[in-house]
Image (cartoon, rainbow, N blue to C red):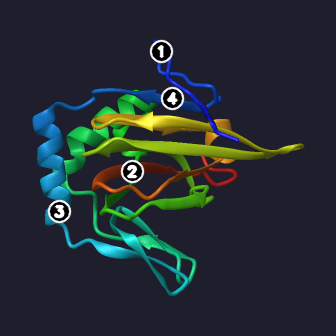
Amino acid sequence: MMPAIATPDLFGSTAIPGLAAGADVLGVDEEAELIARIDAEPLSPFRFQGWLGKRLTRSFGWAYDFDNGSFAETDPIPRWLEAVRSKAATFAGLAPGDLVQTLLIRYDPGAGIGWHKDRPVFEQVVGISLGNAAMMRFRRRGANGFDRVAIPLLPRSLYHLSGEARHDWEHSIAPMDVPRWSITFRSLKRQAGAG
């Protein structure tokens, strides 16, 4: 069964509660500069329990180690990401300082990301898509199999996952034939009893 294609309405909302998308949040020159900055970083293949993925990544602020399940502070978010983090926070209705983790990803041809939910330690997820368009797929197990939805991730667009979209649905991006870059910002889940 083909997934329903959700296109954002005028207010950026989609068919899944908690999923919002916005187009053209960056200019073409900003996008080119961000891609060059990402490519200049020491990116490493994504590691998952001894397996090396095709996508290349680098974390700032906080890093989750999928080989041993540890979560720790890492290099601070660099200044060159401050302006785009501010745009992401504004779109999500957050303060820039709430987005304390950043993940840079370069998807070379053949790279994608499988079905997953972001780690439970994270709460809000705001992603910015660069380079080439991709389709972000969502699925949720229902009584009669999986409910499926897909949204286009256009170059220079962003998406925000919160609530139901963040916690009840898995998401993925199929491998592509062209390169793509992304910047993902995340907030941390508040601990019980925390202000």
Q: Provide the secondary structure element on which disc 3 rests.
A: helix
Q: Earlier in the sequence, mark 2 or mark 4?
A: 4
* Disc marking residue 11: 1
- Which of discs 3 and 2 lies nearer the camera? The answer is 3
Cα–Cα gap, marks 3 and 2: 15 Å
Q: Amino acid at mark 1?
A: Phe
Residue toward you, 94 or 54: 54
Residue 190 at x, y percent in the picture: 60, 50
Furthest toward the right, the residue is 143
The crowding category of the residue bearing disc 2, from other C-alpha atoms within 10 Å (few below 14, some 14 to 19, many at least 20), is many
Please report the residue visible at 45 percent of the width from the left and 29 percent of the height from the top: 21
- Cβ atoms at labels 3 and 2 below 8 Å apart: no
* Residue 93 visible in this rendered orientation of the protein: no
Q: Residue at x 61, y 44 (%)?
A: 138
The Cα–Cα distance between marks 1 and 2, rounded to whole angstroms, is 21 Å
Closer to the N terminus: mark 4 or mark 3?
Answer: 4
Could you classify mark 1 by the number of other residues whose Cα lies within 10 Å: few (under 14), some (14-19), or many (20 or more)? few
Whole-angstrom CA distance, mark 1 to mark 3, is: 33 Å
Q: N-terminal of the two: label 1 or label 4?
A: 1
Q: Looking at numbered disc 4 in the image, what kind of residue is underneath it?
A: Ala
Q: Amino acid at mark 3?
A: Asp
Mark linked to residue 39: 3
Q: Dividing the image into 4 quarters, which one contains the N terminus?
A: top right
Q: Which residue is mark 2?
A: 184
